[in-house]
Amino acid sequence: MRIWREGVRAALGAALVLAVVVGTASAHSILQRSIPSANASLSTPPRQVVLVFSEPVVAGLSTATVVDRQGAVVSQAVAVAGDGRALAISVGPLATGVYTVRWRVLSATDGHTTSGFLLFGVGERLPAGGAAGAGLIGPPVSQVLVRWVNFAAAMLLAGTVFFEFLILRPLRPRPDTSGVLRAATVTSAAVLLVGLTGEFVLEAAILLDTPVTGVWRSGTLWTLLGGTKTGWSTLARAAGAIILLIPPSSSGRILRAAMLIWCVIVGVTAGLLGGPVALVGSVHLAALVLVASVYGLVSVMAAVIVPKIPDAAVPEFPIVAPIAAAAMLAGITVSSHAVGSGPAAAVLDWLHLLGTSLWVGGLAPLWLVLRHVPAADRASVARILVPRFSRLAAMAVGILLVTGVYSALVHVGSLPALTVTPYGRTLLVKLLFVILAVALGAYHRFVMRPRLEGPQPADHAPRAFLRSLAAEAVLGAVILLAVALLTITPPAAVTMPVAARAPLVLAGLASAFRVDLTISPAEPGWNRFEAMVRTGEEPVPPEGTRILLRLTKLDEDLDPVTVTLQPDGGRFTAEGGELGVPGWWEVQVIVRQRGTRDATTLFSLKLGSVSGRPDAQARRILMQARETASRVRTWREREQITDGSAGVTVTDLEMMKPDRVHYRTAGGAEAVIIGVTRLYRQGGGPWERDMLPSAIVLLGPYVSYLNNATAISLGRMGRCDEERCRIVTWTLSSGNASFAAWIGLDTFRIYRLYMAAPFHYMTTQAFDLNAPLRINPP
């Protein structure tokens, strides 16, 4: 029991360290969208191509090019833009034709390389039968095979260590199996070290798009090793293998313990600072080198001197080897899909690897031990070892079941993804072999084990068990092949085809102009703007007309940005990263023509998640604004509401407490409401009457929007008429709508209100407060 308690404590400590070091994002950098989009046919050539990925990419190690039909490169500089998820590729003048965009990026989250291509046309459509959409290039066979060998070696190495610690060590007397298990440890550790070198060089060659021999001349090996998750994973696994290679002699035990402590301290420090490269750039580098040198020298001296001291007993440090094996498994997690899904997912992934090493990795040591003992003693040894391993394997299968279900929920996401994505299909193949292996394990537990534990087991029972155990080990190797492929295949959750989302079309009136502003994809980052401006049904001529966008961040004091849209056929277009920050935005469209005053219209826009925090001052301002508004008896409003799909309603309202409203819409509708009675007409026609379900009750300008406000926070400062004012943002407790308002800091008057809700973008302004007003039935 003491050994099990030590193992549990070590596992909990390792899980805590892993949870602290791991960050949060999504796994694999998958192309989410592009500007221009895949298969787009453009009437005018773009100035640049933008690729937006699902997670940040490493700037210096991610590339993209644009080539024409003849393969000539037409792209120029490539830069990481926005929040690190976008690659902006500047291009020279493009002639009419079809162009291919090729990209290869390194994820800053999990260290995996992904690559692909897409096509777009300038002045012509894509040829029939050409490649469609955005293609994702799969991993080469060599990479899968090398990773498979490394997985098998790591599982055998960890499984041998855990088998010796949990199965053999508690036995008294203990079977003499140290030679065969030590040989398995040395062999698997040596294979792992060689395989890690091959895997790292191969991944570097794939990333740099160069032959393996060119990797050594690239000058980027240290950057890859110390500055990427792939490199960190390689270092962690190599450190664990080297520790386990040290012989378990008196000197070796001292070196093992010292090296483990040093690796844990340096590894955790590097992880918290951002990786080994951060240590190199640290101001404390000299101190770290000095401490490490002194520590290493003292450790070597202790390993040489202490064993030679008479009567000096060197502790066995039995927990060192399991901790080193667990740390080696954590190195695999560092570059796994799970590391991008948060600390909990990373810890569960590590537990999944731990369960795999206990079960699949423990099959070979059990087979080797039973094969090593003399045939005459095999049955008696099997009666001791098989029940202990059976209990351990059952516990491991339970861990695998829980962590595997969680992993599938995170990385697959839906049942259709199991059949339509490469990740899902590979997972199904893996599950098939897991079921076969579990069935064979159940056969061992309920059929073979009783035969071995009988008072007089049949002579052939141990031999039959060895053959069956070998078959289970082969199934385990096949499972590890599927795992190796899964680790370098983008998860189904990020590659599952999704229906294209309709672009956001904000519609409004600017004096005599109708403005339809399309923003695509209307997410934080790079966006394309298209404005259609019409008078009646005719688009305005591009000659003598300028269309400007003035973008103002409402919840932050960022400088407003003005974007000039360029004529593009019957529209005006532009693209850029001006909406790169999530939150509240005011979008003002300015129509400028020679000899006339500018015509403008305003839209409210809420992108992504708003990071504002509840603020006591903001709450006080909003409550005082509500009190001020509740004292207003009469007022007028002008309200513009667009549904995001080119629909718009502009309404002029007159309101008088407690229950009188008169409104006219730009479409010609007019109504007078008094209590429950409504009189209405369309286009100046005859009045009609109906009854409302309940009487309206006016509380004051926007008071109904201020009740039940939550998440109230402050935004930018500004001026409204003659007083200072400030933006206050909030949401309703129902969570269905969000608001932002300019509120005067002297009068606490609400000058302008913005609302964002599903299919509902409203901008409204109240004026003529407490002015003489009469609303009577027509």
Image: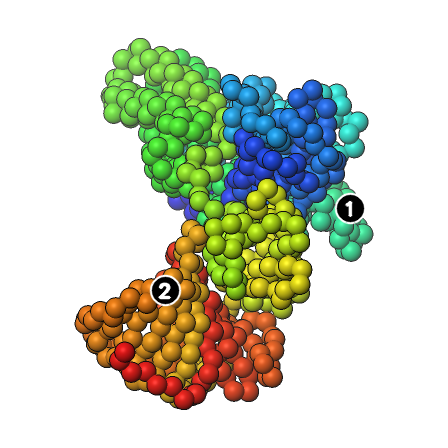
Q: Residue at x 56, y 32 (%)?
A: 41
Residue located farthest toward the front when viewing the structure as drawn: 685
Quadrant of image for the C terminus: bottom left
Q: Is there a contact, CB below 8 Å, between mark 1 and mark 2?
A: no
Residue located farthest toward the top when viewing the structure as drawn: 460
Label 2 CA crowd tier, 10 Å (few <14, some 14–19, many 20+) = few
Q: Foreground residue, 593 or 476?
A: 593
Q: Residue at x 55, y 36 (%)?
A: 37
Total numbered badges shown on the rendered structure? 2
Q: Residue at x 47, y 67 (%)?
A: 763
Q: Foreground residue, 76 or 435?
A: 76
Looking at numbered disc 2 in the image, what kind of residue is underneath it? Gly
How far across and how far down the image is residue 44, in percent?
64, 37
Q: Residue 293 carries which label?
A: 1
Q: Is residue 243 above or below residue 271?
A: above
How far across and how far down the image is residue 184, in percent?
54, 23
Going from N to C along the chain, the mark reached first, 1 or 2, is 1
Label 2 SS: loop
Q: Which mark is residue 305?
A: none
What distance separates the C-alpha of mark 1 from that of mark 2? 85 Å
Quadrant of image for the N terminus: top left
- 749 with respect to 101 (left or right): left
Q: Is residue 10 above or below residue 73?
A: below
- Quadrant for residue 230, please give it: top right
How far across and how far down the image is residue 467, in percent?
37, 13
**Residue 699 seen in this snapshot:** no
Looking at numbered disc 1 in the image, what kind of residue is underneath it? Ser
Q: Which residue is drawn at 47% across and 34% down?
A: 495
Q: Residue 668 carries which label?
A: 2
